Image (cartoon, helix red, strand yellow):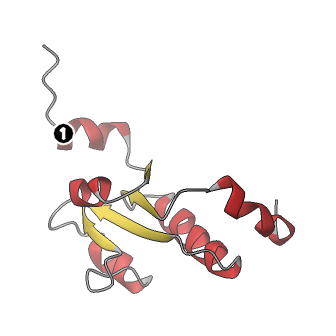
Amino acid sequence: GGRDKYEKLGQAFAGIKKIGVIGWGSQAPAQAQNMRESFAEAGLDISISIGLRAGSASEAEAEACGFTKEKGTLGEVFDVIADSDMVILLISDAAQMSDMSFDWT
């Protein structure tokens, strides 16, 4: 779809006010910015927030794309997840396993 589909965004994202994008690898920058711009173009009040690990080297890149702590659009992974209506997980499987500890018992 393209711009002719913007009118359908409100229906597709009904009830969603905040989307958390977790990670800043190969896909997240383009997807987060595309959603932010598409929602704005469609006149929707849906915010996009980026969740990164504390001290992430990607923080400066996310800030350069306009996601900031001051605007509430950049934060720590679990804070962004807790504050989001929808989460898009865009970190690699390897990073998930190395960053998270799971109790499988």
Q: Outermost residue toward the right? A: 4
Residue 62 falls in which quadrant of the image?
Answer: bottom left
Residue at 28% x, 74% y: name it. 59
Residue at 46% x, 69% y: name it. 48
Near mark 1 (Cα within 10 A), the count class, few <14, some 14-19 or many ≥20, is: few
Where is 81 relative to 44, above or below?
above
Residue 82 location, x and y as percent? 27, 54
Judge from the rendering whether residue 37 lies leftward or rightward of residue 98; answer left or right: right
Residue 100 falls in which quadrant of the image?
Answer: top left
Q: Could you tell me how many numbered marks the image carries?
A: 1
In terms of depth relative to the viewer, which is nearer, 1 or 99?
1
Q: Secondary structure at mark 1?
A: loop
Question: Label 1 belongs to which residue?
Answer: 100
Quarter in which the C terminus is drawn:
top left
Judge from the rendering whether residue 60 lies leftward or rightward of residue 37; answer left or right: left
Residue at 22% x, 59% y: name it. 79
Residue 38 location, x and y as percent? 66, 73
Where is 32 relative to 82, above or below?
below
Q: Outermost residue toward the front? A: 15
The amino acid on which the numbered mark 1 sits, given as a three-letter code, is: Met
Residue 95 location, x and y as percent? 28, 44
Residue 93 falls in which quadrant of the image?
Answer: top left
Residue 40 location, x and y as percent? 62, 80
Quarter in which the N terminus is drawn:
bottom right
Residue at 69% x, 81% y: name it. 41
Judge from the rendering whether residue 67 lies leftward or rightward of residue 95; answer left or right: right
